Image (tube, helix red, strand yellow):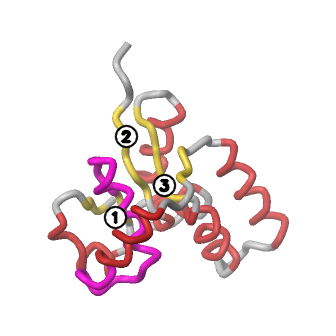
Amino acid sequence: MERPEETVVDASVAVKWFSVEEGSDRALSLRNQHVDGKRTLVAPDLLLYEVGNALRFKPGFNPSITAKALDDLFDLQVDLLVPSKEVVRRSSELAFKYGITTYDSCYLSVGELMGVEVVTADDEFFKRAKDCGFLRKL
């Protein structure tokens, strides 16, 4: 049996699984491929906090809706990676190199170290780091 393709997703993609907005259809397609076993979604564990924070400020979200979304995110079983010295060190280097936040660079470092594509819906992040060669816009 062939192993599913791995893809790193950032919080800007995952938020679209719970909030209908531009690009939600493409984000849901990625999520559905993961659910169907055709793709494995990977992210640093930072994803949980970033999604929770983003939903906290979304109009129409309240504590119970946000908690339900975070429960659903856990249930999706995205491969969440705990920080390692190598990921944190590389994240810092990439943040300086591309002029991005260390949060965004964390997704890049995971993708780079795993040798897989990183998908983002964040225009500014993509604009600054697209030259890395493995970042794709949703």
* Separation of residues labelled 1 and 3 (CA atoms): 10 Å
* Residue situated in front as seen by the camera: 42 or 138: 42
Given the current orientation, which residue lies at the most extreme right position?
Answer: 64
Using the rendered view, name the quadrant where residue 101 is placed.
bottom left
* Tally of numbered tags: 3
Which corner quadrant holds the C terminus?
Answer: bottom left
Q: Which mark is residue 10?
A: none
According to the picture, the residue beneath numbered tag 3 turns out to be 43
The amino acid on which the numbered mark 2 sits, given as a three-letter code, is Glu
Q: Earlier in the sequence, mark 1 or mark 3?
A: 3
Q: Earlier in the sequence, mark 2 or mark 3?
A: 2
Q: Residues within 10 Å of mark 2 (few under 14, many from 20)?
A: some
Q: Which mark is residue 108?
A: 1
Q: Secondary structure at mark 2?
A: strand
Q: Which residues are magenta?
A: 95-118
Q: Residues within 10 Å of mark 1 (few under 14, many from 20)?
A: many
Q: Is residue 67 left or right of residue 46?
A: right
Magenta segment main secondary structure: helix
Which corner quadrant holds the N terminus?
Answer: top left
Residue that appears at 34% across and 69% down: 90
Where 109 sits versus 97, above or below?
above
According to the picture, the residue beneath numbered tag 2 turns out to be 6
Q: Earlier in the sequence, mark 2 or mark 1?
A: 2
Is 24 covered by the magenta stretch?
Answer: no
Residue that appears at 26% across and 61% down: 135
